[in-house]
Amino acid sequence: MQSLDKDPQGNGNSGSRYSFIRVGVTTNIEGIGLEKAGIKTEKSKVVVDDFYQTSVPGIFAIGDIVHGPALAHVASAEGIICVEKLQTWMFIRWIMEIFRLAPILTRK
């Protein structure tokens, strides 16, 4: 880690008066009813599968409360994965509904 009180060449003061360092992000998921809903947690994170679905079917989790880096662009990508999975499920259910209703709609 480079000192902020010197310029990149190591000479003199870089002119900075203050430095801000942020180390780590902790989640706050205790007491919000996850256990009551049956959602599994591990080390203050919600346990999810590859498509960010929790242990309860139909409930997804993304962002700082799941494994991986707590960054906005990462959460955005996780959200896209969830939506694409949901679209697939909705399409499959729509096709199944067509096949279920086809005999009824084609009766004379």
Image (cartoon, helix red, strand yellow):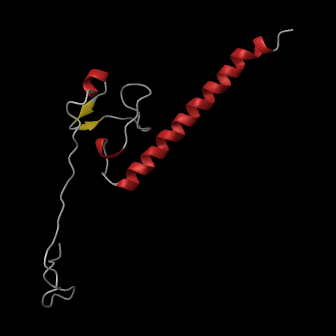
Residue most extreme to the top: 108
Horizontal side of residue 33 vs 83, given as left or right: left
Number of numbered discs overlaid on the protein picture: 0
Q: Is residue 53 above or below residue 64?
A: above
Q: x and y percent of residue 87 in the render?
A: 57, 36
Q: x and y percent of residue 12 in the render?
A: 12, 90
Horizontal side of residue 15 vs 57, given as left or right: left
Please tell me in which quadrant of the rendered image residue 79 appears.
top left
Residue drawn at 21 percent across, 40 percent down? 28
- In this orientation, which residue lies closer to the viewer: 82 or 1? 82
Residue most extreme to the right: 108
Q: Is residue 50 above or below residue 105?
A: below
Q: x and y percent of residue 6 in the render?
A: 15, 84
Residue most extreme to the bottom: 11
Q: Is residue 107 above or below residue 61?
A: above
Q: The C terminus appears in which quarter of the rendering?
A: top right
Horizontal side of residue 95 vs 9, given as left or right: right
Q: Is residue 100 above or below residue 43?
A: above
Residue drawn at 31 percent across, 48 percent down? 68
Residue drawn at 29 percent across, 41 percent down? 65
Horizontal side of residue 69 vs 9, given as left or right: right
Residue drawn at 31 percent across, 22 percent down? 37
Q: The N terminus appears in which quarter of the rendering?
A: bottom left
